[in-house]
Amino acid sequence: MFQNFRLAMAWLHTWFGLALGFVLMVVFFFGALSVFDREIDRWAIPQSRFAPQPMPSFDKVLRPVFESMQPTKESIERMKDKVDGPMPERFDTVRRWGAYTTHRDPVLGLFAGYVVPNAKDPEDGVWGNRTIDPRTGAALPDDRLKVGSRFFYPLHYSLNFHWKNLGTWIVGFAALMMLVALASGVVMHRKIFREFFTFRPRKTTQRSALDLHNMTGVVALPFHFFFAFTGLVIFAGIYFPVSHTQLEPLHELHEKIEAQETGLPHDRAGVAAPLASVDAMVAEAQRRWAAQGMAGEVGFLALQHVGDANGYVSIYRAGTDRIALVGNGIHFKASTGELLREDPPKSAVDGVNEFLTGLHLQHFRHWLLRWFYVLGGLAGCVCIATGFLFFVEKRKKQHARAGSQGARVVDALAVTTVTGMLIAALGILIANRLLPEALPAGWPPRGDLEQYAFWAAWVLAMAHAFWRSAPVAQGRMAPAWREQCWAIAAMAVAAVLLNWVTTGDHLLKTLGAGYWPVAGVDLFILTGAALAVVAARKLGRRARVVPAARIAEAAHA
């Protein structure tokens, strides 16, 4: 079929890259934004614009909030078909309380799980959640969407398509094929070291696109390989669900044996018991961490079997001082505060897994390294986008002569994915600032409306890309690229201005106060606007040069 192995790898690289590049573009871009997901949350929710807070007192702040919580309506609705009989009016048997924070979180997320009487599967339950101001315990509005951590972040690994985990499966397959594309790319480029330094921006679009594709692919090759691989490792339990399918009985037995060995009860005793001071347990956990030379704050706090004699409290350290995702968990008996267990040192295999997971999820406190992550993700976007451009530029004249629409379709999809994705991201930010604080009765939740704005903006961008793609079928450049670049620039400036008008937090104010989460998001958006203007102007000049060159050729002929 192919004359040599290198040509086979070139075919594999081209067609797998084209088929899955649209998914990988979303993964890289929103993965890059997710590096600063908490900062985007603060931009989107002005009520959270204050300094990050440590885990507050459980006894004084968190316990009253937990005791006032109930499951969400959505959780109860999902559970109705899994119960023999009616659902109770109130849920009083608490399976679990939990609180999680990071060094970048000003607000605190709480969640609670409840036992459902007469559930067909006793392991099933309902859940409640709440976001509070940790300084006072006051609840923040439930309809506010955390655009960074609850929309952009899951979008990069699940496409926010959660039915049967199908989005996660699509991204996983794309990541696997990306590893194949990286390997085949190395094979097909024999002069890979020279391509590291080669970029000819004044050459033809085809030549410049290929140079930039090669350069960004080579420069960020270790980054791209590592993140594709560790993403597959993190979700291995979904891609290979052995423990919860073929070996489920063995998995349940293992949990019970592990509970016996660790002293952490697997089931409720059915005997009511009081709750001792959790603050005292936190102080003891911090004392033990300090004795081990790892003094730190609490990152995750969980209470299992609340109000039961088998209840216990698990306290995990916020491991922001190291790359590996470690928690150094310490567990206490809930009713007495007696120490039950300290998590032992991890095995070599677990240690490698924690390091790879931590390096991917980047919970560590290292701002320069975070920016390298952003640059690596954006380099991946450039590599994929220029791959699309090279594919179209190489084939559009040939397709035009043959009357084929292939290059036109690919170009329209590329516009949709590259610039359309940016328009959608800006669309949700603009909707976040335009929607009123209090919506009329009967309207969908505010967060749902913001998500509708995101998808609507992307659909409009796709419709525009296909509408303006006709010149590609004639061997010319689609004006959609230039027009959507101008749209990005205008929307980016509008988003920053709307943040100023609706909150009063303009750049001079946030920069003067040193409040970098909001100032940084504004500056990042404006930088994108500037790049979009530069790109639009260059595309405009190139569109004018090409017809002039064709006229000259025709006159000469």
Image: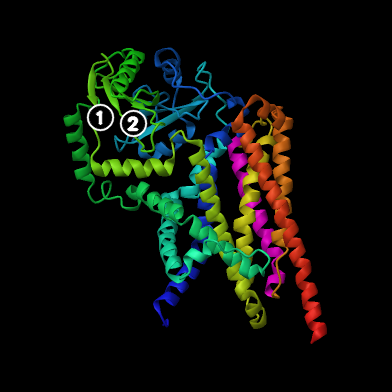
Image-based side of 17 in relation to 270, left or right: right
Query: Which colour style is shown?
Result: rainbow
Numbered badge on residue 144? none
Q: Mark 2 points at which residue?
A: 327
- In the image, residue 331 lies at what x, y percent? 27, 24
Q: Residue 396: image x %, image y %? A: 64, 74
Mark 2 Cα-neighbour bin, 10 Å: few <14, some 14–19, many ≥20: some
Mark toward the start of the polypeptide (1 vs 2): 2
Q: Is residue 457 above or below residue 124?
A: below
Going by the numbered disc 1, the residue's amino acid type is: Asp
Query: Quadrant of the image for the N terminus?
Result: bottom left
Residue found at x 36% / y 45%: 356
Q: Residue at x 63, y 52 (%)?
A: 458
Quadrant of the snapshot with the C terminus: bottom right
The residue range painted magenta reads 445-473
* 553 magenta-colored: no
